[in-house]
Image (spheres, rainbow, N blue to C red):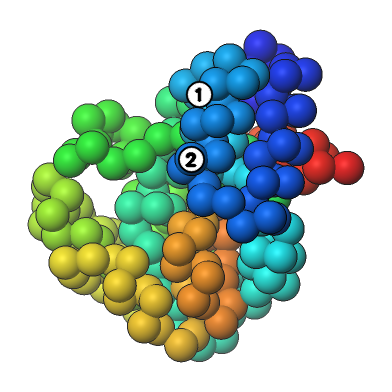
Amino acid sequence: MRESIFTQDFLQAAKDYRLFLDMGYPEKAVASLVGNKYRLSREQRMILYRGVLPSYESEKNAKKKISAKDINGKLIIDGYNVLLTIVNYLTGRTVFISTDSFVRDIGGIHGSIKKQDMLDRAEQLLCDFCRQHIQGEIVVFLDKPVSHSAELAVRLDRLFSSYKIHAEAVLVDSADYELKRHEGVVATSDSVVLSSAACAADLAAEILQENFSPWFPDLRECMS
């Protein structure tokens, strides 16, 4: 996180935001209130909204976290969540550790992913990691409504086949819905999915750490 983003006003805003969340106030309203009070930029507001969770939720999610390398059974991957985190890192966008210990970014899906070269690289990194470290069956869920999801599924299946990985990419109406139904390990940093998960792997973070040795600014330090 660049110093111009990680300001003293932002640090205080993060503490105030967490305090309101712990008191049960709604996220969007509080994010707007605190963001306006401290005159946060759009990027700072997104970091606040996506990265600061209530204390109890942060602790609960952190306890669910396991390493993807330790998984023996089936792994369900939140395809766009994992790939977009990698893409955003590759393009130099802000990627950070949230208060629940999961790595997140400020980007989102707006119908399609335009940086095809970065997406190709993210797909390759995903497959490389799976080939080296994941022993069990792998299923990657992709949201059908996102543009070019069918093409992405075909590319991933080809990579899986060429790498002889026991995996498949599956198009679904809602990846979140399917992930929340799964009783095993899910690979995602989506807080909605994590709230329902029994255990989860921060797969994007592990892939980035193995390939780039990145430094991620840690929002947990703001809460001390």
Image height of 222 relative to 101, above or below: above
**Residue 177 or residue 49, whichever sits in front:** 49
Quadrant, the C terminus: top right
Amino acid at circle 1: Glu
10 Å crowding of disc 1: few (<14), some (14-19), many (20+): few
Horizontal arrangement in the rendering, residue 8 relative to residue 27 (left or right): right
Identify the residue at image location x=57%, y=60%.
Answer: 202
Measure the alpha-carbon separation of dots 2 and 1: 17 Å
For the residue pair 198 and 137, the one nearer the viewer reads as 198
Q: Residue at x 75, y 38 (%)?
A: 15
**Image quadrant containing the N terminus:** top right
Residue type of the residue flagged with mark 2: Ala
Task: Judge by depth and name the residue closer to the eye, 106 or 90.
Answer: 106
What residue is shown with label 2? 29
Placement of 31 over or under 24, stated as above or below:
above
Secondary element under disc 1, as helix, strand or loop, is helix
